[in-house]
Amino acid sequence: MKVLVTGGAGYIGSHVVLDLIEAGHEVVILDDMSLGCMENIHNQAEFIEGSTLDETMLDDVLSKNIDAVVHLAAFKAAGESMIHPEKYSQNNLNGATNLLNAMMKNDVKTFVFSSTAAVYGYPEYLPVDEAHPLKPINYYGFTKLSIEEMLKWYDQLKGLKFAALRYFNAAGYDVNGRVMGLEKSPQNLLPIVMEVATGQRNSLDIFGNDYKTKDGTGVRDYIHVNDLASAHVKALEYLQDNDSFTVNLATGEGYSVLDVIHEAEAVTGKKINYTIVDRRAGDPAELIATSNLAEELLDWEAKYSDLNTILKSMWNVYNQEENHD
Ligand code: UD1
């Protein structure tokens, strides 16, 4: 298949592109490079620098025998989305709308969408499954949920076939070292821990140690980007003969902030200094999910998402001179 990957130079997108090419697909990357990394653009992919806000360009790209679209281009900082919702409306909502409309115009009917655990909001039970209520608590999650809703309507009205993949906490780097460019301005726990290990930061703040969890710190379900990537390829193939679907991509296993710090110390051989500070607004104590549906439908399983493999693959990238000058 000839597959357009929006956000294909980004952190998750660059891993998806690797797997698509390995599976024999032809890839066109569209990325505006606001968060993408030149170094991570696959040399066998065609690269177009541009934005999903450029409708003329989208129409042009989609008129060139594209069979399917994997849409990852979006802003994803939950905190920022509460301060600048308009940025998220424009980039995430308008971008997805333009893309879907250009697809319809050019009769491209297969769509794999990068969704998120943020569509659920605070977990009402654990592990979270796909039947859990959808009540986002940040604007970022709202934009992703709105796009999921739009996809259902386009399926019903226009015959779109879509896969909405709800990622839990994406982490790690390619286990074979093929993606070496660091994510731009990362704000999540694991990259911050890595920056403490390299000495780019002196220490990190732990947002609360009085949660009702095994050690009082927040527990999350970390999923390796290679595992996320393989699910995209399987989703694309599944949609060739089957109906649209929405699934979680997670492991069902939770690690606390202290688990992460201790394992990172073992992997890197460095001391990870930290300070306990107040809880961060909007953080649930624990968030873990089942991926039974993805396993069943796609014959997919997470292979690299144990904490040790995740952290080793990250240290391989962070522990390079050029990545922490
Ligand atoms: C965050 C977003 C979520 C988004 C996901 C992927 C929020 C509230 N949630 O998830 O919407 O889908 O990223 O981009 O922004 N922690 C610390 N110190 C730090 C950083 C994090 O203690 O400096 C803790 C957090 O309190 C949490 C855990 O580490 O318990 C993981 O945090 P993080 O990596 O930011 O991810 P989430 O907040 O789960």
Image (tube, rainbow, N blue to C red):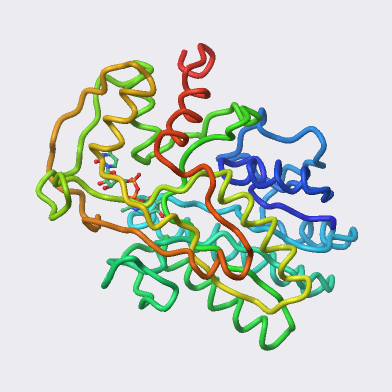
Determine which quarter of the picture holds residue 47. top right
Q: Nearer the viewer, residue 220 or 37?
A: 220
Which residue lies most toward the left here? 210
Task: From the viewer's perspective, tell me whether residue 137 is left or right of residue 47.
Answer: left
Q: Residue at x 66, y 47 (%)?
A: 16
Residue 45's spot in the image, x, y percent?
Answer: 80, 41
Determine which quarter of the picture holds residue 34. top right
Task: From the viewer's perspective, tell me whether residue 264 is left or right of residue 99.
Answer: left
Count of marks placed on residues? 0
Which residue lies most toward the bottom here? 157
Q: Residue at x 59, y 26 (%)?
A: 180
Determine which quarter of the picture holds residue 132. bottom left
Q: Is residue 239 above or below residue 35?
A: below
Q: Is residue 13 above or below residue 129?
A: above
Q: Nearer the viewer, residue 281 or 180?
A: 180
Q: Is residue 20 above or below residue 70?
A: above
Q: Nearer the viewer, residue 103 or 25?
A: 25
Q: Nearer the viewer, residue 125 or 47?
A: 125
Q: Quadrant of the N terminus?
A: bottom right
Q: Residue at x 46, y 47 (%)?
A: 170
Residue 158's spot in the image, x, y percent?
Answer: 73, 84
Residue 205's spot in the image, x, y percent?
Answer: 21, 34
Residue 287's spot in the image, x, y percent?
Answer: 31, 58
Q: Is residue 169 above or below residue 191?
A: below
